[in-house]
Image (cartoon, rainbow, N blue to C red):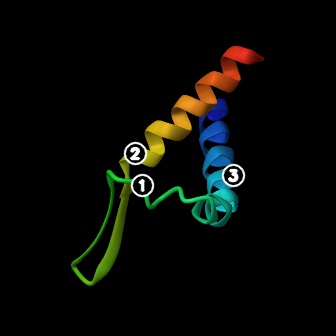
Amino acid sequence: MIRWMLVIFLALLLISWFTPLLQKLGFGKLPGDFRFRAFGREWFLPFTTTIVLSFVASLIGQLI
C-alpha cells in the first residue's frame, strides 16, 4: 500500500511540473476539456487530455 501511495505522489508531482509545458503544447484546451466557475472557484476537468496522455503512455509502455 505504501508503494502505491508513493507512486501516486510521484505521478502527481510530475504532472504538476509538466503542466505548464503541456499547456504550451495545447493540452488542456482540447475539445472535451471543460473549464467552468462554480462556488467562487475555477474548475477544470481535462477529459480529452487525460485520454490522449493515457494513450501516449500506453504506446510508450508497449514500445519499451
Tag 2: amino acid: Thr
Q: What number is the disc on residue 8?
A: none
Outermost residue, left side? 39
Where does the image place residue 64, in percent across and percent down from the top left? 78, 17
Determine the secondary structure under disc 1: loop
Q: Residue, x 53% and y 30% (percent of image)? A: 55
Q: Position of residue 34 (x, y in %)?
A: 31, 60
Q: Outermost residue toward the bottom? A: 40
Mark 2 vs 3: CB contact within 8 A? no
Q: Which mark is residue 30?
A: 1
Residue position marked by numbered label 3 in the rendering: 14
The residue at which mark 2 appears reads as 48
Q: Sequence-wise, which precedes: disc 3 or disc 1?
A: 3
Q: Which residue type carries mark 1? A: Leu
Mark 3 closeness class: few <14, some 14–19, many ≥20 residues within 10 Å: few
Q: Is residue 6 left or right of residue 49?
A: right
Q: Residue at x 47, y 59 (%)?
A: 28
2 or 1: tag closer to the N-terminus: 1
- 3 or 1: mark nearer the eye: 1
Q: Report the mark closest to the observer, 2 or 3.
A: 2
Q: CA distance from mark 2 to mark 3?
A: 19 Å
Q: Are marks 2 and 1 in contact (CB under 8 Å)?
A: yes
- Mark 3 and mark 1: Cα distance apart in space: 21 Å
Vertical side of 57 occupied by 61: above or below? above
Snapshot quadrant of residue 58: top right
Q: Earlier in the sequence, mark 2 or mark 3?
A: 3
| In this picture, residue 6 sits left or right of residue 36 | right
**The disc labelled 3 sits on which kind of residue?**
Leu
